[in-house]
Amino acid sequence: MANTDKPLLIKRYASRRLYNTETSDYVTLDDIASFIRDGREVQIVDLKSGDDLTRQYLLQIIAEHESHGEAVLGVDLLTDLVRGYTTQATSVVPQFLTASFEMLRNGQSKAMENMTSMNPMANMPGFDAMRAQQEAFFKAMSGGIAGASSRSETETPPKKDTASNDDLDVIKAQLAEMQEKLSKLSK
């Protein structure tokens, strides 16, 4: 069994073919995207130079999904990203995006926990299968990141406590502060 604690090493040959070092076979970008969706970290290196090409290939996977009608990133967001690369704000944009995706991941985890711990149906026969299907649905809809932030209309909203409201207020204040800084930097 492969060690999933360390990244899956993919080597790129001079022919640009990608080689999975764990299974000793060639893989495609779709295979790599599947590994990532399954929760596996990957590292792609050039066989000859040893250069880390992971970032380049991850961007290529995103670009291919976007160009094949699986658009997740709106034009406004893409425009803002381009602006981020062309302004002094480049030091703020990556941190902001990382923090935003981390919040989405945490929200997804909490939603899945709430489904099992607070749900009176948890003791019903077949509930585990239904929960597994919902987890797969969340994962498929979000690519493992953002799906938990949107609930269907039939779901009951989670109970709100003052601690989470305070956290939300803090996050909103931080977001407003970052937006203000970005505005000043773009002027």
Image (cartoon, rainbow, N blue to C red):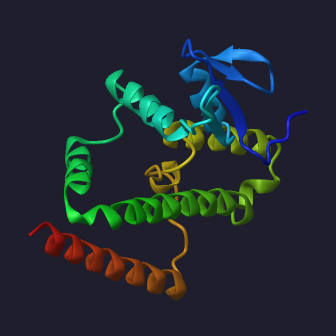
Tell me which residue sits at (64%, 38%) in the image: 43
Between residue 141 and residue 177, name the one nearer to us. 177
In the image, farthest residue toward the left? 187
Tell me which residue sits at (15%, 75%) in the image: 184
Tell me which residue sits at (23%, 48%) in the image: 82
Q: Is residue 5 above or below residue 168?
A: above
Choose top left, top right, bottom left or bottom right for residue 4. Answer: top right
Between residue 135 and residue 99, name the one nearer to us. 99
The image shows residue 13 at horizontal and vertical percentages of: 61, 18
Q: In this view, does 101 lie above or below 77?
A: below
Asked if residue 97 lies left or right of residue 132, the reply is: left
Quadrant in which the C terminus appears: bottom left
Q: In this view, does 128 lie above or below 150?
A: above
The image shows residue 163 at horizontal and vertical percentages of: 53, 86
The image shows residue 11 at horizontal and vertical percentages of: 66, 26
The image shows residue 59 at horizontal and vertical percentages of: 43, 36
